[in-house]
Each structure stands twice: as structure tokens, then as C-alpha cells.
Amino acid sequence: MNVLLDYLPQFRDGFLGTLAITASSALLALVLGVLIAGFRVSPIPPLRAFGTAWVTVLRNTPLTLLFLVAFFVVPQVLFQGASPYVLATLALGFYTSSFVCEAVRSGINTVPLGQAEAARSLGMTFSQTLGQIVLPQATRTVLPPLSSIFIALTKNSAIAGAFGYGELFNLSKLLNDKGYAIAWIFLWTALAYLIITFAISAVFRLLERRMGVAR
């Protein structure tokens, strides 16, 4: 118990750090995931091939390996001096985007083909059909898997702590090194993660109720 009171500002900063990396990575993953899902259902073969390669490579690569690339290769090649926050966001966002892409693609496949054919018969382009007809209808079926993906992303953010980013896992490691009882540290850290994941679940349940179809 004392460890929480003695290091309350550090726990607060670690909690905010986890929130920040989760939110920024989720936003990046959502944007990239929807874009790549569009590529995967595109009538243009090179775009479909790029989307397939993106998902295959990122989904089958260990997240720790992506963190190693982000922290030790990217600064040497692309972004010298990038902060741990930016690098961790890139690793988490790119990795999670492959799962978001597949969730969105499965939602697109639930929309009857006739909807897209009707839109094309009216002269709408592929991007107009996807953005104005198909994706709005697919959103309802995509929400449940997206909730699970973003909860998993929250827990995966703990890896960023091992690479020096100031979040809850990093704080737990520092306090454990100072000799505090690991059980209390894990308890407060687990409670903090539960608060974040319950909040994500609540937001998605609210969205599902708002967008649900009356039966």
C-alpha cells in the first residue's frame, strides 16, 4: 500500500504514459487499418498485393522484434533523435493495424455484394462506394472485434516500458529494483490496466448500442 502513496506522482505519470501510447497507437492503427483494408478489397492488383503483404508480414512478426527495429534501426535510417514515445507508437500502431485491417475487411465482406453493384451502376467510383456505402454498413459488425484488438493493444503497450518509455510497466520495474514488494506493485499496476481496458469496453458497448439494429 505504501508504495502507491510514496510514489503517487510516478504512478500518475506512468498511468498517463500508458494512456498516451495506447491512444496514439490506436489512432494510427485505425487509420492504417482502414486504409490497408481498402487496398485489400481494391480492384487494382498491385494495391491488393501490397495490402496482403502488409498484413502477412506485420501480423506474423513478433511485436518485440518490431520494437527492436523501431528503436535500433529506424533512428539510424529515418528519424534520428526520435523520442521513445514516437518510436513506440510506430511499432504498436503498425503491428495493430494489421489486425484492424482484417477486422475491417471481415466487416466489408458482410455487406451484400448487391450494395456495391448498385452503387457502381449509379456511377460511383470505388472509393465513393467504399466510403459512402460499404464502410458505414460494415461499421456495426466491426465494433466487437475492434474492442478486443484495442484492449490487446493496451496490454501490448507494456513492451514499450522495456525500451525506456515511461509507462506503468517501466515504473513497476524501477520500483521493484528499489526493493519494494513486487506483489503490491503488480496489484496497483493491474488495477490501472483494468481501468483503461474497462473504459475501452464501455466506449465500444455504448457505440454498439447506439449503432445496433433493432430486432
Image (cartoon, grey):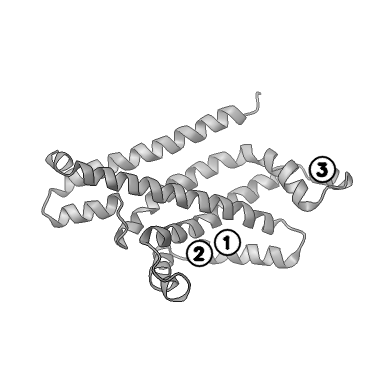
Q: Regarding mark 1 in the picture, which secondary structure is present there?
A: helix
Residue 188: which quarter of the image?
top left
Along the polypeptide, which appears first: circle 2 or circle 1? Answer: 1
Residue displayed at 69% across by 47% down: 109
At label 1, the amino acid type is Val
Residue displayed at 10% across by 53% down: 179
127 or 206: nearer the eye? 127
At label 2, the amino acid type is Asn
Q: Position of residue 143 (x, y in %)?
A: 56, 39
Q: Position of residue 35 (x, y in %)?
A: 63, 55
Q: Regarding mark 3 in the picture, which secondary structure is present there?
A: helix
Q: Which mark is residue 114?
A: 3
At label 3, the amino acid type is Gly
Few, some or many residues within 10 Å of mark 1 (<14, 14–19, 20+): many
> In whole angstroms, how far apart are the C-alphas of marks 2 and 1?
8 Å
> In whole angstroms, how far apart are the C-alphas of marks 3 and 1?
27 Å
> In whole angstroms, how far apart are the C-alphas of marks 2 and 3?
34 Å
Spot the residue most to the front: 81
In the displayed structure, 129 sits above or below 177; it is above
The residue pinned by badge 2 equals 60
Q: Position of residue 128 (x, y in %)?
A: 77, 47
Residue displayed at 44% across by 71% down: 74
In the displayed structure, 139 sits above or below 60; it is above
Residue 187 visible from this viewpoint? no
Along the polypeptide, which appears first: circle 3 or circle 1? Answer: 1
The N terminus lies in which quarter of the figure? Answer: top left
The residue pinned by badge 1 equals 55
Q: Is residue 106 left or right of residue 23?
A: right
Few, some or many residues within 10 Å of mark 2 (<14, 14–19, 20+): few
Residue 3: which quarter of the image?
top left
Q: Position of residue 206 (x, y in %)?
A: 52, 29
Q: Regarding mark 2 in the picture, which secondary structure is present there?
A: loop
